[in-house]
Amino acid sequence: MTSTVGKLLRTASDAGLHHDIRTIWQAYEVAEQAHRGQRRISGDRYISHPVEVATIVAGHGGTAPAVCAALLHDVMDDDAAAVPASHLRRLFGCEVAGMVEDMAAQHIRSEYGVSRGVMLVTLADRLHNLRTLRRLPAASRRRASLDTLEFHVPMAHQLKASAIAAEMSDLACAALGSLDGRSRKEPLFRRGPRHRDRPGPRDA
């Protein structure tokens, strides 16, 4: 058991989810298998990201299904090792599978209504990516920071997650401030005939 998983389980237990520890562990095992061999830009194992997202969710009052969905929120995105929704429904029930499907389909940005659990997982996902944003190219840092201030911070206030809203605002504004004084060697947009940098990867 890695220390990050240990922190997640302690956080979940402290939050009153001790009766759900076995289910949370099972969700971790499914996510770990789906992401096995994958790395983040930092070089960290990819599983470290959903574990951190789930820890944030547990620490901010998330339910056990929301914590499980946080661990599983990327398992349907990987074409090579994608976990089908039917498998998630069989293992964890319709609530968890539905939240993962909403995350995969980006319903949070559409006209579809989403649950508070999906909103919390979305915020936790962005918060952890902001914490590691410095590893992304300048254009990606700018795009993510502006999107955070325009979309995620208002959502956090809507959810009354003031601590998350404050940290995201601080991190996004700090990133934009550092870009304002960036070296000319790393331009926000490359010069060329109407060509912009392609969006960077979601993870940092």
Image (cartoon, rainbow, N blue to C red):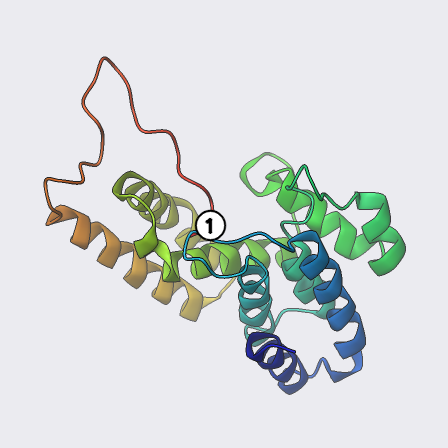
On screen, residue 135 versus residue 13, left or right, reads: left
Q: Residues within 10 Å of mark 1 (few under 14, many from 20)?
A: some
Q: In the displayed image of the protein, which residue is found farthest to the right?
A: 90
Q: Which kind of residue does numbered mark 1 sit on?
A: Asp
Residue 119 seen in render = yes
The front one of 179 and 6 is: 6
In the picture shown, does residue 71 fall above or below 191? Answer: below
Instruction: Pinpoint residue 201: horizontal percent, then vertical percent.
Output: 45, 41
Q: Residue 78 falls in which quadrant of the image?
A: top right
On screen, residue 138 versus residue 38, left or right, reads: left
Q: Residue 30 falls in which quadrant of the image?
A: bottom right
Label 1 sits on residue: 203
Q: Residue at x 41, y 57 (%)?
A: 42
Q: Secondary structure at mark 1?
A: loop
Q: Residue at x 17, y 54 (%)?
A: 178
In the picture shown, does residue 67 fall above or below 158? Answer: below
Q: In the displayed image of the protein, which residue is found farthest to the front?
A: 37
The front one of 4 and 86 is: 4
On screen, residue 138 versus residue 69, left or right, reads: left
